[in-house]
Structure formats: structure tokens, C-alpha cells
Amino acid sequence: MPAPIRERLAETAEAAHPREAGGFLACERRGDRLRAVSHVDLDNEAEEPTRRYVATVDERAPARPRVFYHSHTSAASPSGLTETDRRNIPERFALVVFAPHGEPYSYRLFRRGLLPWRELPVEAAKTDESPTRARLPRLV
């Protein structure tokens, strides 16, 4: 994920906080990897926007390959996919931006398989010198 895209995601999450933010990353394939090339945010239409993200997918959504993203804004919410996310996200790829205080703390990417979701690594672009925000460590 190039720095300008990551910065735009951060700005969107911070501006929406404490409401969850979301939208799509338009991507291009590079071998077995996806590279984000642009960002489209969509309004949160959920009845409880501080706890859920719901949006109408319209013509603004980029063509596939694309990644659906949304933020989790509560410190009590998990940094990964919730059971609600697992049941309701229709896309093949989902990025969770964990931003309990507005500023993103981690980015976690998931791909839907035949049955379960599987976590994939999120990497900074090779030309990006800023550090990535890795997934949160598991608490034992």
C-alpha cells in the first residue's frame, strides 16, 4: 500500500471518528500481489455508525480487483474481522483499519476462501520509506 493511499485512509478514518469509515481501494495485480492505486470512501449509513459500517455500493466502487475497507473505532472492538464482518462482507478482499482513537494503529487484510477468511500480509510499497503499521500482536 503506497504512502499516499495509506495517508488518505488515515485522514478518512480520523475525520469520521468516532463513526466507522469505509469504502474501497482500487487495485492492480502485480504477480500474486495486489497494489492499491486509488481510494474511494463511501458514507456510513449504519443505524449505529460508531459500531458498524454499512454503505450502498454504487458506480463509485472501482472495478475488480478491489479491496473493501472499513475502520473499527472502539478500543473494545477487535482489530480483525468480527463475526458480523465475516457474515456480511460480500467482497473477496477486506481490509480492517483499527483506529480506536482516530489515528490508525494497524491495517489487517483478509481474503475470503471457499469457506473461511484468511489473513494476508499488508506491505508498504517498495518505494515507500515510512514504516508499515503491522497487525496488532495477539494478547495471551
Image: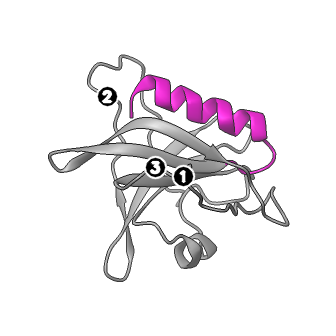
Q: CA distance from mark 1 to mark 3?
A: 13 Å
Q: Secondary structure at mark 3?
A: loop
Label 2 sits on what residue type?
Ala
Label 3 sits on what residue type?
Pro
Q: CA distance from mark 2 to mark 3?
A: 20 Å
Residue drawn at x 36%, y 16% as measured from the top left: 129
Looking at marks 2 and 3 on the same chain, the residue that comes earlier in the sequence is marked by 3
Q: Horizontal placement of 124 versus 38: left or right?
A: left
* Label 3 sits on residue: 62
Q: Secondary structure at mark 2?
A: loop
Quarter holding the N terminus is top left
Q: Nearer the viewer, residue 40 or 6?
A: 40
Q: Nearer the viewer, residue 119 or 27?
A: 27
Q: Secondary structure at mark 1?
A: strand
Residue drawn at x 36%, y 83% as measured from the top left: 115
Place residue 52 in its image quadrant: bottom right
Q: Are marks 2 and 3 in contact (CB under 8 Å)?
A: no
Magenta span: predominant SS is helix
Label 1 sits on what residue type?
Tyr
Looking at marks 1 and 3 on the same chain, the residue that comes earlier in the sequence is marked by 3
Looking at marks 2 and 1 on the same chain, the residue that comes earlier in the sequence is marked by 1
Q: Is residue 27 magenta?
A: no
Q: Which residues are magenta?
A: 1-21
Q: Position of residue 107 (x, y in %)?
A: 50, 44
Q: Horizontal placement of 29 versus 98: left or right?
A: left
* Label 2 sits on residue: 125
* Label 1 sits on residue: 69
